[in-house]
Image: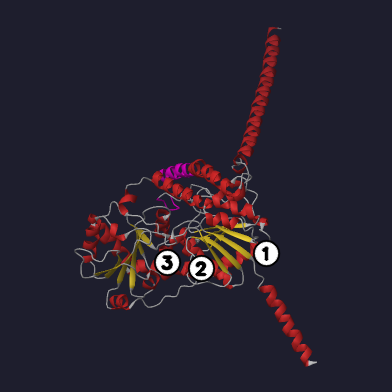
Amino acid sequence: MKFFLQVGICLSILTLLSCKVRGYKILGIFPFEGKSHYIIFEDLMKQLAYRGHNITVLSHFPQITPIKNFKDVSLVPNTDIKIRFDFDGFMKLTKPEKVLLIAKNGLRSCAHLNSSAIQNFLKTNEEFDLILIEQFNSDCFLGFSWYFNAPHIGITTHVLMPWANHFFGSPDNPAYIPNHFMHFSDRMTFSERVMNTLAYIFTQDVGRRYVDVASYEIAKKAFGENLPELSDIGRNMSLMLANTHFSLTRPRPLVPGIVEIAGIHLHSMRARPPPENIEKWINESKDGVIYFSMGSMIKGHTFPEEKRKIFLKAFGRLKQRVLWKWENETMPDKPDNVMIQKWMPQYDILCHPNVKAFIAHGGLLGTTEAVHCGVPVVVMPQFGDQHTNARALEAGGGGVVLNFREADEEMVYNALKTVLDPEFNKKAKELSARFRDRPMSPMDTAIYWIEYVARHKGAHHMRTAAVGMPLYQYLLLDVFGFLAVCTLSILFIGIYVTKLFFRLVMSMFSKSDKKQKKLKKN
């Protein structure tokens, strides 16, 4: 009897486990060549593979060491691709030119659809339960969802692009939601709201006219002439995973289909002691250390000479030591409290208790790591979402914005003294506490919703009625028009009745006067 009971228990456990580890076949499509973007997605796809799902990933960064349940499809023969920029180039670009640059990069990414790697992959006619697609500067890769007839999830490394909200009917009010390419926080002056509204209209127009039309033509060549409009495919998107969090990127209304997962790339990262020479430099600084890095996409050594001297003079006035990520071997006129190195383990440095401040460009990866570690930031945004990230961080108490073009020695020095103040450090720690305080980790949140969409065959019940609604209905223009007509009609009828009433009264008074006059005559 005892034996049969044990067998029954074992069978029950095995049955439960087999149900729990039901694996889905998932395709991930990440066409942008920037490594900083892929970092957000890579660990997520690995974790899905570790949890028993069958993963295929199209990217420029295949795994060096094979992973179980994980298959790479390399988009280019040479996977050592680095998108790099210099300061001078970006300082010369206007805001519209920066938007067009992102659009041009999107069309360049679309060209990969006609590569032999993707065309050969399409010919395999594989079947997938779910597709994850990066939503960045073009929608041409949405064709994969139609081609494989599978529900799809968008995933973005930043706040949603201005043209992505309509896929979910999510509010995108320019009165308090700053445009992705502007320099505003969520609390704008009248003039800023005017500029923000114009930017909203401009980016929508660029997205529709410049990118969507050209992207659709490229996509049709890859997927076939029967491909529906990309916007129609986009409106069938089941979910959007956004690398945002209201404590960091400021609160905004989100429909159920948009889920915030900022900090997901930190899941597998554990702060370790930095390399010995860096750790020694940090530990021996009794007043703390400032870390200076402009990320992986901007060449630090392209710093304009005039600006470099300004920063070095400001650093020379500080008691703190400075770690500067600098790609050249040497730096002229470097003061003794500055240490340069081509590469530094950023997360390990930021989480070191003796690091007191961070000078950065406002990319969301570095910003997230600084907030997670509770380090205040002097932000010098250059392009893309960095400006809105910087303003959001400043509004949340985690940093100050420094205009790189206008910066002089005093401005740099004062910005650093501001964030080094103990009271400012306290604010940064409070922001860090708010950012970390969640019911589930970003990774667990992302995986839960991915599996939820797969379990419910696309989870279309999450889609609001606003998706695909005509603009005049969404803005209630027809309702306001109807109410205006009704109001005017009531007013017109009221005025008309009032006039009739007064005419009747006047007529009665007139008749009464005539009678009285007759009586007097008689």
Residue type (three-letter) at the residue carrying disc 3: Val
Q: Residues within 10 Å of mark 3 (few under 14, many from 20)?
A: many
Q: Is residue 367 above or below residue 187?
A: below
> Which residue lies most toward the bottom here?
2
Residue that numbered label 1 is attached to: 455
Q: Quick one: label 1 or label 3, which is nearer the N terminus?
A: 3
Q: Is residue 101 above or below residue 478?
A: below
Highlighted magenta segment, given as a residue range: 183-203
Q: Label 2 to label 1, Cα distance in Å? A: 22 Å
Looking at the rendered structure, the secondary structure element under dot 1 is helix
- Can the viewer see residue 454 in this picture? yes
Q: Position of residue 233 (x, y in %)?
A: 61, 49
Q: Is residue 416 above or below residue 223?
A: below
Q: Label 1 to label 3, Cα distance in Å? A: 34 Å
Left or right: where does residue 46 sit relative to residue 500? Answer: left
Q: Residues within 10 Å of mark 2 (few under 14, many from 20)?
A: some
Q: Is residue 223 magenta?
A: no
Residue type (three-letter) at the residue carrying disc 2: Asp
Q: Position of residue 271 (x, y in %)?
A: 42, 75
Residue that numbered label 2 is attached to: 43
Residue that numbered label 3 is attached to: 371
User: According to the image, what is the colour scheme of the structure?
Assistant: secondary structure
| Front: mark 1 or 3 | 1
Image mark count = 3
